[in-house]
Image (tube, rainbow, N blue to C red):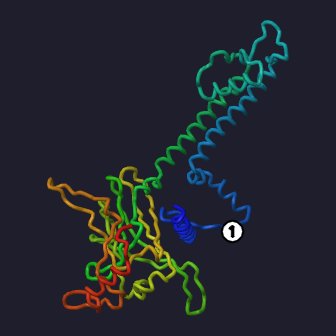
Amino acid sequence: MTGTLPEFLREYLANRQIHKNRLVTKNGHCNIAYGSVKQSHFFVHFLDFWTTLMEMRWRFVIFLFGASLVFGWFIFGLFWYWAAFANGDLTWQNPPAGHKYCVENLFDMKGAFLQSIETQMSIGYGYRLITPYCRSAMTIFTIQCVFGTVIICFWCGVIMTKVARGKKRSRTISFSKMAVISSQKGSLCLQIRVANMRKSLMVGSQIYGKLLKTTVTPEGETIIMDQIRIDFIVDAGKDNLFFVCPLTLYHIIDESSPFFQMTVDTLHQQEFELVVFLDGTAESTSSSCQVRTSYLPKEIMWGYEFLPIISRSKEGKFHIDFSNFAKVVPVATPPCASQFVKSPDGFHDTQTDGHRFQEMEDQFCATSL
């Protein structure tokens, strides 16, 4: 146990460092820190209060919901106490016999607070009861009933909107943890697998990518986060995907691709981040959502391809085996895109396929994610 502890710690620290170095995490969150922001800019969160509530965690929303109710009960409790005080109803005021109370059996602040709760929550009056002899009590009653209705409707809208957000639908879209590069469809392709974990479709789905890297222009200007568009295609094209089953996305590595100059030996020495986006609309709720993930050079495997995941049963039904969703196998692949030349039989490496396949088996030993 003691011998494996340092290795475990090294792996943990390495994964933590990779997580910090990402712009976009594997689950789609953006690692951006805002520094030297003026204090006045923080008031934007209060001006756009609805968006702030939508972005809050549930624990804070529930806390604000409860705090707003308790605060409202307390404030109107003070009004009820003031009405009783103005009418001489309190115990320490020694009301005379036959005194007409604003609220019967309201003698102190505790009773005023309970009266406020009973009024706002419409749970009915029992021990305490409003009388028609005090205009201030009727005014407070009317205002609190309106306020209670508004505050309950507001928080119901907040909760329903947060529950129905497209962000939750995006949790059911899964990308493969690793990307692979191999020969597919007569070209050298970078491949990523994506799956919809629900039977309801994502309507109008579009998938594209951005390669983020630091570049230096011919004028000597350094661009820290230069964005290069990466186009992906599937068997049916790149627009309006029929996202009913897991799809394998292909990016063709040709002269226009930023991966064209990379080789199997230099890929993991590069510094870039491939961010993949999926935009779509949930068929069941008509809410739009975007799913994001990213891949670092260490998460791209050269010379591998994904295992088949779709089969057909004897009854004629299509079967999806998600146990093979992230599994890969080594295949013969050229070491670089420039050696991927075309012959009469298709595209082949300038080296022999058998020799290259043996090199791939020696270089990569992991066959599953």
Q: Can residue 159 be seen in this view?
A: yes
Q: Alpha-carbon neighbours of circle 1 within 10 Å: few (<14), some, or many (≥20)?
A: few
How many labels were placed on the picture?
A: 1
Q: Is residue 79 above or below residue 225?
A: above
**Residue displayed at 44% across by 56% down:** 171
**Residue displayed at 81% across by 16% down:** 91
Q: In this view, does 318 lie above or below 113?
A: below
User: Residue 185, image x and y in percent?
Assistant: 26, 79
**Residue displayed at 31% across by 59% down:** 322
Looking at the image, the residue that sits furthest to the front is 2
Q: Tell whether 161 sits left or right of 182.
A: right
Toward which corner of the image does residue 194 lie, by quadrant? bottom left
User: Residue 26, image x and y in percent?
Assistant: 48, 65
Q: Tell whether 329 sits left or right of 133.
A: left
Residue highlighted by disc 1? 35
Q: Is residue 225 above or below residue 93?
A: below
Q: Is residue 17 above or below residue 118?
A: below
Q: Tell whether 122 sits left or right of 272.
A: right
Q: Which amino acid does label 1 sit on?
A: Gly
Toward which corner of the image does residue 253 lie, by quadrant? bottom left
- Camera-nearest residue between 103 and 92: 92
User: Residue 313, image x and y in percent?
Assistant: 18, 56
User: Residue 10, image x and y in percent?
Assistant: 55, 69
Circle 1: element type: loop
Q: Quadrant of the C terminus?
A: bottom left
Q: Is residue 19 visible?
A: no
Looking at the image, the residue that sits furthest to the top is 97
- Camera-nearest residue between 356 and 299: 356
